[in-house]
Image (cartoon, rainbow, N blue to C red):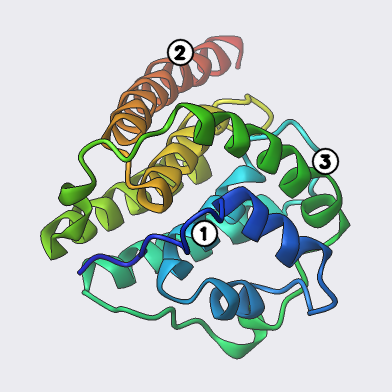
């Protein structure tokens, strides 16, 4: 079985996420994984990668979130069913930027996706191999976002790709997965080509 399961009938994922956000519990990675249980990997990566996908001042926290995403992707590749992270990461508060701005904005976009998602190709997500491949994609996309030239905005596209892939796992929709893969390819190409052009320009100026 793959990591997410279908939520209770009639309950949308966006409503579950909003309820968690408005609840009294701590807004930490550990609590996020505990509440969403078997969907923990996908939901945690969805939240983590939404931050570098937005043009918001984050004080460098995006690199930490990308690093955590790489670790989670590696755990998916290894076949883990539950999240393991160092205690200090699990206890880390997500912060006002994430809980006050990023997640509410994300919930609005998730609701739009839910209106057009119909669980296409849900059977694909039931295979362990699929889970491992998706873990590899998360590792590659988070690495690409982390290696994007600073202040270039090039980390946005691979981050959006990771978001789409994580959402495809939660919604069990292969069309959303394909959108994420296409975005990922575009993002990596942009980072390689524009990043190389920027380095070349700097060399010429020096």
Quarter holding residue 48: bottom right
Residue that badge 3 annotates: 57
Q: Are marks 3 and 2 in contact (CB under 8 Å)?
A: no
Residue 130 location (% of width, % of height): 17, 54
**Does 28 sit left or right of 59 as displayed?**
left
Determine the secondary structure under disc 1: helix
Q: Quadrant of residue 41?
A: bottom left
Q: Position of residue 6 (x, y in %)?
A: 38, 60
Residue pictured at 40% horizontal, 73% vertical: 38
Q: Secondary structure at mark 3?
A: loop
Q: Which residue is mark 2?
A: 197
**Residue at mark 1:** 43
Q: CA distance from mark 3 to mark 1?
A: 22 Å
Side (left or right) of 113 relative to 77: right
The residue sitting at 62% across, 72% down in the picture is: 32
Residue at x 41% of width, y 33% of height: 117
In the image, which disc is placed on residue 138? Answer: none
Q: Position of residue 56 (x, y in %)?
A: 79, 37
Callout in the foreground (3, 2)? 3
């Amino acid at each position: 079985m793959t990591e997410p399961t279908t939520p209770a009938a009639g309950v949308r994922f966006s409503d579950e996420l909003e309820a968690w956000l408005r609840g009294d519990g701590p807004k930490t990675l550990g609590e996020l994984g505990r509440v969403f249980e078997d969907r923990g990997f996908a939901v945690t990566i969805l939240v983590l990668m939404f931050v570098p996908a937005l043009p918001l001042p984050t004080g460098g926290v995006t690199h930490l979130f990308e690093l955590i995403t790489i670790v989670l992707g590696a755990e998916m590749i290894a076949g883990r069913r539950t999240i393991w992270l160092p205690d200090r990461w699990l206890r880390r508060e997500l912060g006002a930027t994430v809980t006050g701005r990023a997640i509410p904005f994300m919930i609005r976009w998730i609701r739009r996706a839910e209106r057009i998602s119909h669980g296409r190709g849900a059977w694909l997500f039931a295979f362990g191999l699929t889970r491992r491949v998706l873990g590899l994609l998360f590792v590659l996309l988070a690495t690409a976002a982390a290696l994007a030239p600073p202040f270039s905005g090039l980390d946005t596209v691979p981050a959006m790709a990771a978001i789409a892939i994580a959402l495809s796992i939660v919604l069990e929709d292969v069309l959303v997965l394909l959108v994420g893969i296409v975005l990922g390819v575009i993002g990596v190409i942009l980072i390689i080509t524009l990043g190389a052009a920027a380095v070349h320009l700097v060399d010429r100026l020096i």
